[in-house]
Image: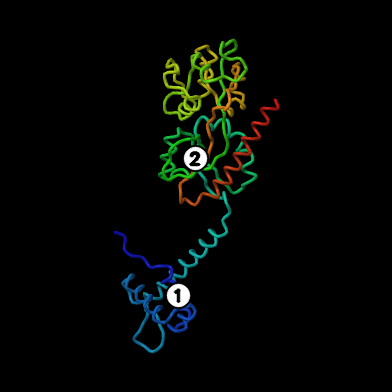
Amino acid sequence: MTPPLPTIRQLQFFLALVRRESFSRAASDCLVSQSTLSSAIKELETILDSQLVDRSTRHFSLTPAGKDVAERATKILAETEELARAAADRRPLEGPFTLGVIPTIAPFLLPIATKKLASKFPKLELFLREDLTAALAERLADGSIDAALMAFPYDLPGIEWIKIGEDPFFYAAPAGDPVASGKPLRSADLKESRLLLLEDGHCMRDHALDACKMRRDDVSGAFGATSLFTLTQMVRAGLGATLLPKMAVDAGLAANNGLIVSPLADPAPARIIGLAWRKGSGRREDCELLADHFTQSMNAASKKAAAR
């Protein structure tokens, strides 16, 4: 069991006494009564199990233990004051920040979003961790990451999050696919296709099914991909068609694989991209700034893709 430790206030009272060599003057400096200061010194002696003030003479003096404590307390309070100043002077997004990102966002948003982060926040030390949503939720809860860039809806107890933007789904298929027409497709149209999605465990699979009002039975079980890159390769090879989020389409994932994309009928099914952090972690301001930066990056990428 950890023994009780002196409080900062007790050390402040003791050093005031050492400096003023008088209980009454020290109490006045500390804006407390003499009895309050005297009680605090006695409590400090009890905690340290040592007499600090020599009370055998009429003149103020310290015991050897008191002199040692005074020297150490001076260093402790100096460090504590420096800590308080550093915390007060800290600006948002300074120092280490560990960000988790799901695989269906990381390769499309991070390359464009992180370019300007260094110039915006030169003292930010960003560490990135890519993982599935369930694993990132656990890391958020245990404090091993500061925030997570992920897709919603997703139930996260004890977590706050802010919306970055919406990411609509598109139907992607090889050239000549009978369902792909370039016109907005309805959920009923998708059921006529051999639809391939990411394997279970990827939240995008569930988001795509829910958004398009489809059942698990509507999706082909012939292939369960672990990444959107692999998934598009399988579609390119003729195994079927798939649903891709707009950020992947904007990044050229479909075009680079020779796939054609069709929008889905309004209201367009979409997943919500958001940034999540632990309640009470003190990271709200950091995350609000990051979320705003990611929103700008998403919008810029979308405009750039529309201009091509």
Q: Which residue is mark 1?
A: 15
Helix, strand or loop at mark 2: strand
Q: Across the whole image, how many numbered discs are drawn on residues?
A: 2
Q: Which residue is mark 2?
A: 148
Foreground of the two, 203 or 139: 203
Residue 305, picture quadrant: top right
Q: Amino acid at mark 2?
A: Ala
Q: Amino acid at mark 1?
A: Leu
User: Is residue 268 shown above or below 101?
Assistant: above
Q: Is residue 215 left or right of residue 174?
A: left
- Give the x, y percent position of residue 131: 46, 33
Most distant residue in the left direction:
1
Residue 154, picture quadrant: top left
User: Is residue 222 shown above or below 1?
Assistant: above
Q: Earlier in the sequence, mark 1 or mark 2?
A: 1
Q: Looking at the image, is mark 1 or mark 2 nearer the viewer?
A: 2
Image quadrant in which the N terminus is located = bottom left
- Give the x, y percent position of residue 278: 46, 46
Foreground of the two, 155 or 33: 155
User: Is residue 124 shown above or below 226?
Assistant: below
- Give the x, y percent position of residue 283: 51, 49
Labelled pair 1, 2 in contact (Cβ < 8 Å): no
**Alpha carbon of mark 1 to alpha carbon of mark 2: how far?**
45 Å
Residue 226: mark: none
- Residue drawn at point x = 32 percent, y = 74 percent: 50
Foreground of the two, 141 or 186: 186
- Residue drawn at point x = 36 percent, y = 65 percent: 5
User: Is residue 240 shown above or below 23?
Assistant: above
Most distant residue in the bottom direction:
58
Q: Residues within 10 Å of mark 1 (few under 14, many from 20)?
A: some
